[in-house]
Image (cartoon, rainbow, N blue to C red):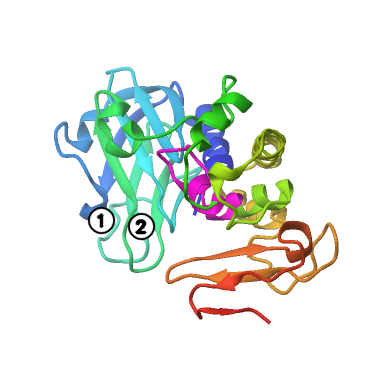
């Protein structure tokens, strides 16, 4: 799933490539991708893109008509830039293509989604706050005013485990499964630690890990073409998706806890005092 760093990089890429250009055609190939119908998606046609914004994991193309084309790539969605779009109309039901946006230059991009769970979403609204997912977002962890007291206030009284709290978009915008693993590894904290139990020193450590991990990921992705962002994300991850590999900090074996639809990775030596965590799917301790 694209998370804050990748969506931030896509925002920068699109700012360079689409701002000042006219949208001449929007072609929804999978009708399920459209989550709003008034205004219709075609209402942005004939208008220039005036700015590109990011809200958490949402991308927003603002037009000079005051309309916003807002996209959430969900779990398996992606944006594929085309220096030259194919001639002719795309055929529905053929491949992962969900929606195509064409510019007056002949360039444009495709929104694609792999797999059978179709969750990629596109909205056309007058105000991004009309998108329910945007309206409920918590603060952005890279915002200038996201300081330690603000993080402490968010976690105060929060009875969930840190892993779940960090992934909650209404608590903190933009962090998903992969970067929550990376942040907790950098902070040397167990994903099962209760969020409300953090001391002032641990708040300081977590805040620093949040900002540093996400900032470094954004910097690695900055300037890359859209098609290279997935590979950059994977190569930059230290623990997520690396079950069985040695921890790059201490050399211990990276472990995994599996759930019904996801998994987390962690280093026992760095994060849990050497103790393996209970695998909730198998309801037993990893040995």
Q: At x 34% / y 35%, what residue is drawn?
A: 136
Q: Which residue is mark 1?
A: 30
Quarter placement of the C terminus: bottom right
Residue 30 to residue 218: above or below: below
- Magenta segment boundaries in residue numbering: 162-180
Instruction: Give the image location of residue 248, x and y in percent.
Output: 82, 59
The answer to the question of whether label 1 and label 2 lie on touching residues, with beta carbons closer than 8 A, is: yes
Q: Of 178 and 103, which appears nearest the observer? A: 178
Residue 274 to residue 285: above or below: above
Q: What is the spatial separation of the Cα atoms under label 1 and label 2, in whole angstroms?
A: 7 Å
Instruction: Give the image location of residue 128, x and y in percent.
Output: 32, 28
Q: Of 55 and 283, which appears nearest the observer? A: 283
Q: Residue 3, labelled with which disc?
A: none
Q: At x 84% / y 57%, what residue is drawn?
A: 249
Specify the quadrant of the image occupied by residue 255: bottom right
Q: Of 91 and 243, which appears nearest the observer? A: 243
Q: At x 47% / y 39%, what residue is drawn?
A: 157
Q: Which residue is mark 2?
A: 97
Q: Is residue 21 left or right of residue 180?
A: left
User: Which comes before the other along the chain, label 1 or label 2?
Assistant: 1
Q: Is residue 276 left or right of residue 68?
A: right
């Amino acid at each position: 799933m694209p998370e804050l760093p990748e969506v931030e990089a896509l925002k920068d890429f699109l700012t360079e490539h689409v701002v000042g250009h006219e949208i001449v055609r929007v072609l929804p190939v999978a009708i399920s991708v459209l989550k709003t119908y008034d205004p219709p998606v075609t209402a942005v046609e004939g208008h220039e893109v005036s700015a590109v914004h990011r809200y958490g994991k949402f991308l927003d193309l603002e037009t000079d008509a005051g309309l916003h084309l807002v996209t959430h790539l969900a779990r398996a969605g992606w944006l594929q830039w085309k220096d030259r779009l194919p001639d002719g109309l795309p055929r529905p039901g053929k491949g992962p293509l969900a929606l195509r946006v064409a510019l007056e230059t002949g360039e444009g991009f495709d929104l694609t989604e792999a797999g059978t769970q179709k969750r990629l979403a596109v909205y056309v609204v007058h105000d991004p706050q009309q998108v329910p997912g945007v309206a409920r977002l918590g603060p952005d962890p890279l915002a200038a005013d996201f300081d330690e007291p603000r993080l402490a206030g968010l976690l105060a009284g929060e009875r969930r485990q840190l892993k779940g709290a960090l992934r909650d978009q209404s608590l903190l915008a933009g962090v998903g499964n992969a970067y929550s693993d990376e942040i907790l590894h950098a902070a040397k904290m167990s994903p099962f630690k209760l969020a409300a139990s953090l001391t002032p020193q641990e708040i300081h450590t977590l805040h620093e890990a949040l900002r540093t991990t996400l900032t470094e990921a954004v910097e690695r992705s900055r300037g890359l073409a859209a098609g290279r962002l997935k590979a950059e994300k994977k190569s930059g991850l230290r623990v997520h998706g690396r079950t069985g590999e040695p921890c790059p900090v201490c050399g211990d074996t990276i472990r995994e806890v599996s759930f019904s639809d996801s998994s987390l990775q962690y280093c026992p030596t760095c994060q849990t005092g050497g103790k393996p965590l209970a695998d909730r799917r198998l309801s037993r301790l990893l040995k």
